[in-house]
Amino acid sequence: MKSRLIAFGKAGRSLVRLTGRVVAFGRRRSVAFSELWRHSLQFRVTISTLALSSAVVFVLGMVLQNQITDRLIDTKENAAIEQTKTVVDTAEAQLVGIGDQDSLENRLRNALNKISSSTSERPQGTAASAAGAFEPVLASGGPDRSSQSNASAGPYERVPDSLKAFVERNQLSKQIHTYVGPTGSTTYLVIGAPVTSSARPMQLYLLFPLTAEQNTVSTVQNTLLVGGMVLLVLLAGISNLVTRQVVRPVRRAAAAAEQFASGDLDQRLAVLGEDDLAKLAVSYNEMAASIQRQIRQLEEFGTLQRRFTSDVSHELRTPLTTVRMAADVLHASREQFPAGLARSTELLVDELDRFEALLGDLLEISRLDAGVEELVAELIDVRPIARRAVEQVRVIAGTAGAAIELELPEEEEAAAEVDARRVERILRNLLANAVDHSEGAPIWLRVAVNEHAVAVTVRDYGVGLRSGEADLVFNRFWRADPSRNRRTGGTGLGLAISHEDARLHGGALEAWGAPGQGACFRLVLPRQQGVPFEESPLSLPPEDVTPESGTNGHSYLGPVVEQPELAAITQKEDG
């Protein structure tokens, strides 16, 4: 018993493994089919044509089969009825004046023999002979007679009872019946008719085998099946060939478009013939040529623009240096000037400072656009860079009354391969921008690290950004509100340069903002150059954004980090 249970368990496990393999194979085939269906127009058209053709062939085959079967049965029935009428006349002549019960069976057998002999002597060309061979049956009985008084001659047991009931009521009837005997089953067309030549009720049944008709129908079915399969194969091949003639030029056009998009602007399609596909190739070539001309023009214009910016910036260096020297002399002697002239001297120096910063940013942008900037990356800790950036905006933050809080990882070193100068410039620009828009609310600078990336976020709780402005803040010279008073004296290029610096690192600089909830800028840099990162250690929008945050106030739900060496910057300068 135990061995049987073990064997049964092994068989069950084998069945489960086999079922799992079958299911896995079916799943793989289904996935492969769906992939091929989505990506191959040729396969999709061929399968669709094959499916529709199968439906048409199936319906047509069923209609033809039904028509042929009905025609065969109708012909058989008409000929069988004519045959029955002729045989009824012979039977009535043989059964005239039939006597008692003892001579009934003999008379029936004699009449049956006469019917068989007269049928074999009849010429084959007559209409009745078209019904084919039959087996006659004579019976005596009625619906009001008991079964003991019935007599019959021939295979009376093959006649269905339902047909007997109609014929015994003096009705000419017909029925297709399958008789199952010891040697097998045979389908008959049974025609029953009453015999009225004697006072005793008599019935004549003719059983016409339908073997020939069944063989004919089977031959028709096989012919339709084979012909339908061959037709479907031919249709599939034809549709595949026709679709291929259309798809191949489209594939060539798609390949040419991909190469054109990858930078091969000289890629063109071969024009063969004068059909619609040739017209498509001509139109594509004209479009590609037009795009190529426009791209070349834009490249030349961009080159001229970058050269103009670079040349102008360089050329302005010399007169700016001269003006700077003269302004410094005037500024050093401003105490000797009247009040109005001294103030003008101070304004002149301030604007010269801003002009120099603008020239520096323009030169930086021109170098980035020209692609001549190189990334001097080294493996360093990002946390000291963040501290230096905070120190550089200490004065303007104190003037604005904005406290800057740092949240740095203490247990883990935030080391990455970065260009310290560029990262520091990015953080300085982000902090200065936050100070300008914080309206005195706290500013948080956070640094986080994971396996592949280092992230820095600068979060303020000022006016925020309206819908769609997060995509515009990195445009050159764009300002959310030109009428706002700026404390940093920015040039309008800081965020654009920061965005290019982040791209040069292989990282990303993104912005989020909402009216009344402030703004958040996130810088994500890969820890190793050339190794892409999958996710950022810090989320954007920031985690402290909640639906309950008001649109007119400031809310902060994060922790307050106290760092003695980097306390909040709240210094203010005297007016």
Image: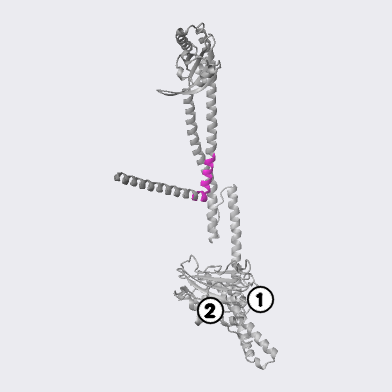
Of residues 420 and 513, the one drawn nearer to the viewer in this rendering? 513
Which residue corresponds to the image point at 53% horizontal and 8% vertical from the top-left? Answer: 199
Q: Is residue 563 above or below residue 61?
A: below
Which residue corresponds to the image point at 61% horizontal and 59% vertical from the top-left? Answer: 290
What residue is disc 2 on?
389
- Residue 36 image offset from top left, x and y in percent: 49, 49
Does dot 1 land on a helix, a strand or a loop? loop
Quadrant of the snapshot with the C terminus: bottom right
Label 2 crowding class (10 Å Cα cut-off): few <14, some 14-19, many 20+? many
- Residue 520 image offset from top left, x and y in percent: 57, 71
- Residue 177 image offset from top left, x and y in percent: 49, 23
Of residues 304 and 193, the one drawn nearer to the viewer in this rendering? 193
Q: Is residue 151 visible?
A: no
Q: Amino acid at mark 1?
A: Arg
What residue is disc 1 on?
484
User: In this rendering, would 25 be left or right of 260?
Assistant: left
Prevailing secondary structure class for the magenta stretch in the rendered image: helix
Q: Is residue 546 above or below residue 239?
A: below
- Residue 301 image offset from top left, x and y in percent: 61, 68
Of residues 32 and 96, the one drawn nearer to the viewer in this rendering? 96
Q: Start and end of the magenta stretch?
A: 35-52
Quadrant of the snapshot with the N terminus: top left
Q: Quadrant of residue 327?
A: bottom right
